[in-house]
Image (cartoon, helix red, strand yellow):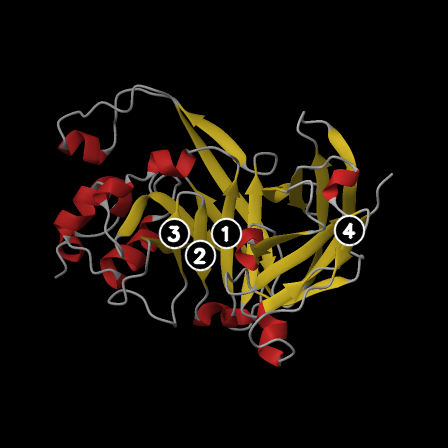
């Protein structure tokens, strides 16, 4: 069987400097590789140069290499394919740390991922070129990641029918969607270093639940999202599209940014400055449908976001979201 050897490759500019060590990682695939200062940053380049049989890939007829990365639960997070020539003595495989963004990890912690390399010939048959090795990721105190797949997400089905919310009645009996809607709840406990840590949250269900719930075509960067909801340690927090509105929140606040329908950023504020872990919940349904209390809705939207009666009615339906508040309060008086 042809042995796969991983050769060290010198970095180009800045080789041998501390900066090069931080931003250029050369994998030996010997079960001793460490990617430290890991924050899933695209500036952190990763490479390995592969030599089949110490000669060339023609030795075992490999013309395509596949590299994939799995976590401790055997969930795949990244895969690449590279074509190689029969006459090549070696081939450099390159990717970067952002390709490993969905790997779950607590802040200031370590986790192992497994790198698998296989070869195929022109007929798609597996060749002797193969390798499997563990690589350790070491995160900083500023970065943590959660990944919830279909096995861990809670799912319920919202059956189609005639809308009965206050907003529907204001809209003259608007019919609900004609199709049933799957509602996903993504929840995980994540280790953090208080409010120093930003959590990258990933929906690994393969579903379009959040994409279906939130019409991003009607949103601009910084807009509040109300058709999906978020909570940290059981307390409802605001969710923004693409970027936070700094007229509503700042570094002292806890909030969520939906960067894509399956990618979220959880920013922790002063209320979590001493936290060692937090429970993050993301749901593909509105705050009202999720049963967020009127008091929490009022604190977030009437007080912090400065919603008036028109805003509240348009987004939630006044009776649904803010029952218990007086007309004076709803009018901002």
Q: Position of residue 314 (x, y in %)?
A: 17, 43
What residue is shown with label 1? 201
- Lower sequence index among marks 2 and 1: 1
Q: Position of residue 71 (x, y in %)?
A: 68, 47
- Element under disc 3: strand
Give the Cα distance between marks 2 and 1. Answer: 6 Å
Residue contact at pointers 2 and 3, CB within 8 angstroms: yes
Residue contact at pointers 3 and 4, CB within 8 angstroms: no
User: Which residue ends up furthest to the bottom in the rendered image?
Assistant: 17
Quadrant of the rendering where the C terminus is positioned: bottom left
- Lower sequence index among marks 3 and 4: 4
What residue is shown with label 2? 265
Q: Position of residue 45 (x, y in %)?
A: 57, 62
Give left or right: position of 204 versus 297. right
Residue contact at pointers 3 and 1, CB within 8 angstroms: no
Q: Residue at x 58, y 53 (%)?
A: 100
- Element under disc 4: strand
Q: Residue at x 30, y 48 (%)?
A: 225
- Lower sequence index among marks 2 and 3: 3
Residue contact at pointers 2 and 1, CB within 8 angstroms: yes
Give left or right: position of 288 versus 280. left
- Element under disc 1: strand
Q: Position of residue 114 (x, y in %)?
A: 72, 49
Residue 133 is tagged as 4
- Element under disc 2: strand
Q: Nearer the viewer, residue 143 or 278?
A: 143
């Amino acid at each position: 069987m042809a042995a796969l050897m991983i050769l060290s490759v010198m970095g180009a500019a800045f080789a041998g400097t501390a900066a090069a060590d931080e931003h250029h990682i050369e994998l030996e695939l010997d079960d001793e590789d460490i990617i430290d200062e890991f924050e899933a940053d695209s500036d952190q380049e990763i490479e390995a140069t592969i030599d089949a049989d110490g000669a060339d890939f023609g030795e075992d007829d490999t013309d395509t290499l596949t590299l994939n990365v799995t976590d401790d639960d055997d969930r795949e997070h990244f895969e690449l394919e590279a074509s190689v020539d029969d006459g090549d003595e070696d081939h450099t495989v390159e990717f970067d740390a952002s390709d490993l963004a969905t790997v779950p990890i607590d802040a200031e912690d370590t986790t192992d991922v497994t790198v698998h390399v296989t070869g195929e010939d022109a007929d798609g048959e597996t060749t002797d070129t193969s390798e499997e090795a563990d690589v350790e990721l070491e995160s900083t105190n500023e970065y943590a990641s959660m990944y919830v797949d279909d096995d861990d997400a809670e799912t319920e089905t919202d059956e189609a029918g005639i809308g009965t919310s206050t907003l529907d009645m204001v809209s003259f009996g608007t019919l609900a969607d004609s199709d049933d809607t799957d509602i996903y709840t993504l929840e995980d406990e994540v280790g953090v270093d208080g409010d120093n840590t930003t959590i990258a949250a990933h929906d690994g269900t393969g579903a379009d639940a959040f994409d279906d719930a939130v019409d991003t075509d009607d949103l601009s960067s910084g807009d509040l999202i109300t058709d999906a909801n978020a909570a940290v340690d059981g307390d409802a927090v605001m969710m923004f599209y693409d970027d936070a509105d700094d007229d509503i929140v700042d570094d002292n606040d806890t909030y969520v940014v939906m960067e894509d329908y399956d990618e979220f950023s959880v920013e922790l504020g002063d209320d979590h400055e001493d936290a060692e872990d937090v429970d993050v919940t993301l749901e593909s349904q509105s705050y009202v449908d999720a049963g967020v209390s009127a008091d929490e809705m009022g604190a977030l939207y009437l007080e912090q976001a400065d919603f008036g009666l028109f805003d509240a009615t348009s987004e939630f339906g006044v009776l649904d979201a803010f029952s218990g508040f007086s007309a004076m309060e709803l009018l901002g008086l």
